Image: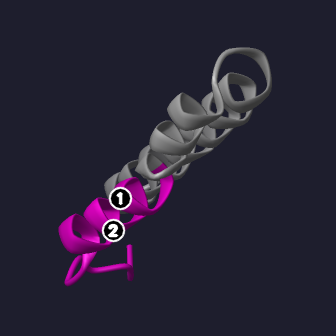
Amino acid sequence: MLSPFHRAKLAFMGAAFISFILSVSLWFLVDREVGLFVGLWVPAIHSLGTLILVGEDDSS
C-alpha cells in the first residue's frame, strides 16, 4: 500500500509523463510550436510537485 506522500509523488510524475507524451505527439503530428509549449509544462509540473511535497515526512 502506498502512503499519501508516495501517491502524491506518483500523481505528479504521472502528470509530467502524460505532458511529455502529449508534447512529443503534438510536435510531430500538429505543430512544433504547440508541442514546445506543452513540453514546457513538464519542468513546471515537477517544480510544483517539489514545492508542494518538500517538507513532507517520508518515513511512513
Residue density around tag 2, few if under 14, some if 14–19, many if 20 or more, within 10 Å:
few
Magenta segment, principal secondary structure? helix
Query: Who's the residue at 48% across and 38% down the image?
Result: 38
**Image quadrant in which you'd find residue 17:** top right
Q: Is residue 59 above or below residue 39?
A: below
Q: Position of residue 55 (x, y in %)?
A: 20, 84
Q: Which residue is mark 1?
A: 44
Q: Position of residue 53 (x, y in %)?
A: 26, 69
Query: Who's the residue at 35% across and 58% down the image?
Result: 44
Q: Amino acid at mark 2?
A: Ser
**Image quadrant in which you'd find residue 29:** top right
Q: Secondary structure at mark 1?
A: helix
Q: Position of residue 37 (x, y in %)?
A: 46, 41
Q: Which residue is mark 2?
A: 47
Question: Across the whole image, how many numbered discs are drawn on residues?
Answer: 2
The residue stretch that appears in magenta: 42-60
Is label 2 in contact with label 1 (beta carbons under 8 Å)?
yes
Alpha-carbon distance for marks 2 and 1?
5 Å
User: 28 or 18: nearer the eye?
Assistant: 28
